[in-house]
Image: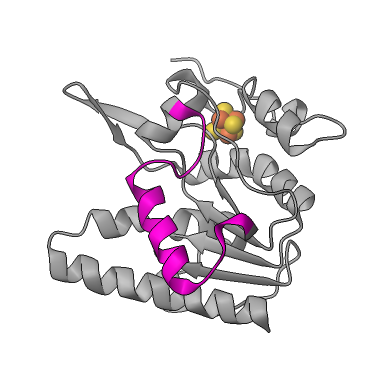
Amino acid sequence: MPTTIHPSAFTFIPERPTLASLTRAAQDCTACDLYKKATQAVVGAGPREAAVFFIGEQPGDQEDLAGKPFVGPAGRVLDEALIEAGIPREEVYVTNAVKHFKWEPRGKKRIHAKPTLGEVKACRPWLETELALVKPRIIVCLGATAAQSLMGPKFKVTVERGKFFETPWAPWLTATIHPSAILRMPDADSRREARARLVEDLRGVAARLRG
Ligand code: SF4
């Protein structure tokens, strides 16, 4: 099979981007293969001057259809955890490391497939442009894909979660579990415990915001 040569995502980013123009421009991106099977590119949502910038992995089935990030079950877990941690939703921008939904068919369902490092790298110009526009005080990476997108492939969320790191994109970056990982846990006790730890990590973010 011939190898597809993809242009860089930079080719598609407007010269003077805004959050609105980024969403439009991302619809034309062909910097990796993921645009082929997705409904649309899903760029971030939230206020232009949000203090906290959440990064997930990629849009899920519902996000792909709606064109908005974190509107499915994982988004509901995040919303509840934010309320419990005392982080106002209006101070939060949410996006993903990868803008197109990667999936595999299982019967009639579209099942999430993990993006490769190459796909995450190809999509990073979109993420970096969002970061440059929002200029958040704190980046919160939800899960390994998001954290490794900015911090490199050796970053381990299991080891580093809850810690704060200085970065070129924001004064602070921290990482925690992705809400969808909580939903995938096999029993109610594990889910309750993981959810409590997510809230605890977000309370750390709230404390930094106040400090
Ligand atoms: S996933 Fe990212 S890099 Fe790949 S086509 Fe979509 S927007 Fe472009």
Q: In this view, does 67 lie above or below 195?
A: above
Any magenta on residue 79? yes
Q: In which quarter of the image is the N terminus?
A: top left
The image quadrant of residue 166 is bottom right
Residue at 68% across, 24% down: 24
Q: Nearer the viewer, residue 1 or 154?
A: 154
Q: Which residue lies furthest to the top in this view?
A: 1
- x and y percent of residue 208 in the render? 63, 80
- x and y percent of residue 100 in the render? 50, 32
Q: Nearer the viewer, residue 10 or 70?
A: 70
Taken as a whole, is the magenta stretch helix, strand or loop? helix
Residue 75 appears anywhere in the view: yes
The image quadrant of residue 200 is bottom left
Q: In this view, does 83 lie above or below 33?
A: below
What segment carries the magenta color?
A: 66-90
Q: Quadrant of the C terminus?
A: bottom right
Q: Nearer the viewer, residue 29 or 59?
A: 59
Residue at 45% across, 65% down: 83
Any magenta on residue 150? no
Residue 178 appears anywhere in the view: no
- x and y percent of residue 111 in the render? 27, 34
Count of labels shown? 0
Q: Which residue lies furthest to the left in this view?
A: 187
Residue at 73% across, 65% down: 170
**Residue 53 vs residue 113: left or right?**
right
Ligand 1 image-quadrant field: top right
